[in-house]
Image: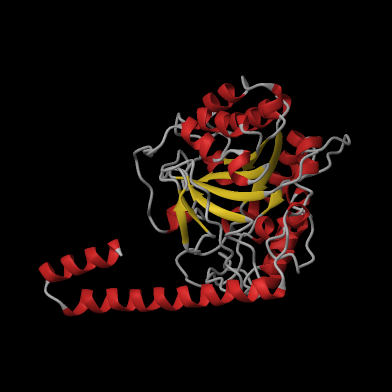
Amino acid sequence: MEKIKRFIDIAVPVQTCNLRCPYCYIAQEDKFLAALPYFMYDAKTMGKALSKERLGGVCHFNLCGGGETLLPPQMTEILYELLAQGHYLAVVTNGTVTKRFEEICQFPEEFRKRLLFKFSFHYTELRRLNKFDVFWNNVHRMRDAGCSFSVELTPNDETIPYIDDIKKMCLEQVGALCHITVARKETDPELPILTGLSREDYLKTWGSFGSDLFKFKMSTFNVKRKEFCYAGYWTATLNLGTGILRQCYCGKYIQNIFKDIDKPIQWQAIGCHCTEPHCHNSHVWLTLGDIPSLDTPTYSSMRNRVCEDGSEWLQPEMKEFLSGKLKDNNTEFTEKEQKAVNRKMAVESAVNTVALGTFRWVRQHTPKKLRVKITNKIKKY
């Protein structure tokens, strides 16, 4: 069994959806678009750019759109090309785009074993649109096709009256309670929990699902990370529409890895210079081991459930792969190397702060024609 070399969180640039959930991060900022996204590169280029040889080994990719991930018709071919490279994939989906699931069922069995669907259970929207049958039929379809799956509910105050119905439905359909994540308030820079409940009541209400994902996420939510982090070196974020690779969500730009697929990737760890208020997706980054000094559960435990009949949501190959840690297949930095990374990141952070300050000053204190000319030069620099 091959060990995980890197984790890349892939943003699918789709901002349209067939649901309208009130807790959605796109909905909170009113960013929904009607049009499907434009991809600057084709699926084969993406696959070659993300080959095992270039990335150093077998990786885990998580693909998630701002809207519904599987709406773009190109997604079937993109998933195929990434699986053809030998990687393990997870796809976040609302489970309603039946055509796409039917297409994926035609993949070779060896590909389907390395595919995990993270079905977001948007209970109130599925209830409003009368789409429960569509959702559960697609969950069963991919389970029967040999794919791994996980059912996850985003807790929302409006959903509380339906908790008993949700539990009953999950036990009937997939033999176990769904996992619970933590919704964040995207319009607040501190990214607090999106709820009107106290933290104690929130824990009590949603902790009743016995979800390891919820338990771990709540233990790290709103906790600023100051340890040395390997994001940017062992992990990264990638924009699938442009090919732009970054250290993390708010990390520095690394390079466009689709533009020249023969060029080595210039990995650079973020070290102790994370600019996020807290690791809001700690259930992935930290459980896979971006901060190896932290003792965390495995990522597989964040996704798996053992059903009443003894079966599991994760297929054996996927479960074993996601039970590994990044340090098992990578070399940790020495203390001297960590200091060098932190020095470099400190200098770059200072330069970026000065550049941003200059940009803002120019924007506020110069005539429009001159401002446009100068800001274009700064952007180019």
Occupied quadrant, residue 248: bottom right
Image coords of residue 113 (percent x, y): 72, 30
Q: Is residue 68 visible?
A: yes
200 vs 97: above or below: below
Image coords of residue 188 (percent x, y): 47, 70
Measuring 88% from the left and 34% from the top, which residue is drawn there?
Answer: 309
Number of labels in the image equals 0
Occupied quadrant, residue 90: top right
Pick the quarter of the image with the N terminus.
top right
282 vs 113: above or below: below
177 vs 379: above or below: above
Pick the quarter of the image with the C terminus.
bottom left
Comparing 72 with 341, the one in front is 341
Comparing 370 with 301, the one in front is 370
> Left or right: where does residue 206 sit relative to residue 24?
right
> Left or right: where does residue 286 sit relative to residue 247?
right
Q: Is residue 91 visible?
A: no
Occupied quadrant, residue 379: bottom left
Measuring 66% from the left and 47% from the top, which residue is drawn there?
Answer: 152
> Left or right: where does residue 123 sit relative to residue 311?
left
Image coords of residue 369 (percent x, y): 10, 67
Comparing 166 with 33, the one in front is 33
Image coords of residue 143 (percent x, y): 72, 29
